[in-house]
Image (cartoon, helix red, strand yellow):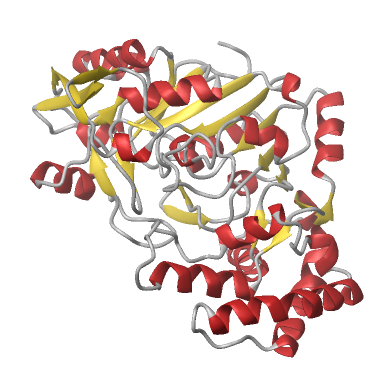
Amino acid sequence: MANVVVVGAQWGDEGKGKVVDIYTERSQAVVRYQGGNNAGHTLVVGDEKTVLHLIPSGILHEGKKCIIGNGVVLDPKVFIEEIEGLKKKGYLQDESQLVIDRNVHIIMPYHKEIDIARENKPGERRIGTTGRGIGPTYEDKVGRRGIRLIDLVNPERFSAKLKELLPEKNFFLEHYLKQKPLDEQQILDEYLAYGEVLKHFVGNSSVLLEECRKKEENILFEGAQGSLLDVDHGTYPYVTSSSTIAGGATIGTGFGPRFIDEVIGISKAYVTRVGEGPFPTELDDEVGERIRKAGSEFGATTGRPRRTGWFDAVALREAVRTNGLTGLAITKLDVLDEFDCIKICTAYTHKGEMLTNFPNDANILSQCKPVYEEIDGWNADTSNATTYTDLPEQTRSYLKKLEEVCKCPVVLASVGPRRDQTIQIRDPFNGE
């Protein structure tokens, strides 16, 4: 038995969905523990692509228990649309496979309106939010003004809470953000209908996971976004609104930290970032565009072009430390197949000083310049490799260099989007 946490080790979009899909084969339960539908996990089975925003990636495997933990904020409309989309593709034939924790907070229409209006307000600093209402929902959660799933599935309780909360939200929308107020009855009718659907999925993630642990079943914890977007440890304020690091897995599910056995960090063979914020190795040139095209670097949720750059070992070492990573999964290795020269950032310079530790201060980070080491590219097709020894010698040298500069072993390498384009070097569920 092993309990494994999968986290993004960069700024998100590292390919967590594929790795979770692979590791699900060894798991009996898959749990999403934070974030909302601002995350998009793209999975490719055969030639069919599926993008999931809320439901754990393990749902593509029959018979796996998939749990949305209490740390998630949930848009009911998006959730129901995902269910319908999965069923059309032949998945989720047994609805008992999917459970939502009763304490999940619900994204309301006013959360989305506030999110978009703030981002577009003249004079306001842009964060690069997706406008899905994630941040305002977490604000209400911490401010003890949130509406949870247990409220939504109780019509009387939900109606009373909406009546209490909406006047304040409408006042803020109308008088500060200069937006139209929202209609209480319209929201009530829409969301009570959602509650009728969601009530069939309500459960207790902490109790369910404890039952799995006692039965010695493997549990896989699935994070969203990336470590450098953590609300406490990321490049604040250019972060998401939840705890994206491995510690969030215990908070967001009610699973004790001493029961976690492995933490695997997912990292691209280069780096991308979506939205605003400092990015020391960003390539705003032909090379960056070449990586973007080769890697199809466009947001699964927004469609926005991702910013691209060379691999940043300084930032990755930060993820190794804050998550306690036991292994790295390197994705999109094949994107670098045709590069003659590949660069790895091993340190920064800031006002003449050499930095080897990641500065969380966004103002300092925005002034940092990367210090690169260069290695020769392999100029060979890696997409058909199925074992580590199938990889060209120079590709293996690159992976060994990443291990060296990040101080963490590589346990998996991905050379394409399909399940069979995955090289497992060590299985975190049995240590081999």
Q: Quadrant of residue 375?
A: top left
Q: Examine the image and state in which quarter residue 221 appears.
A: top right
Left or right of 70 on screen, residue 350: left
Residue 72 percent location from the top left of the image: 66, 51
Q: Residue at x 50, y 15 (%)?
A: 426
Quadrant (top left/top right/bottom left/bottom right) for the C terminus: top right
Q: Is residue 423 visible?
A: no
Q: Give residue 11's position: percent from left, percent from top.
A: 40, 40
Quarter of the picture containing the N terminus is: top right
Q: Residue at x 84, y 78 (%)?
A: 159
Q: Nearer the viewer, residue 24 or 350?
A: 350
Q: In the figure, is residue 419 to the left or right of 34?
A: left
Left or right side of 99 for 44: left
Name the one closer to the observer, 311 or 278.
278
Residue 104 pos. (x, y %): 74, 54
Position of residue 45 relative to residue 379, above or below, is below
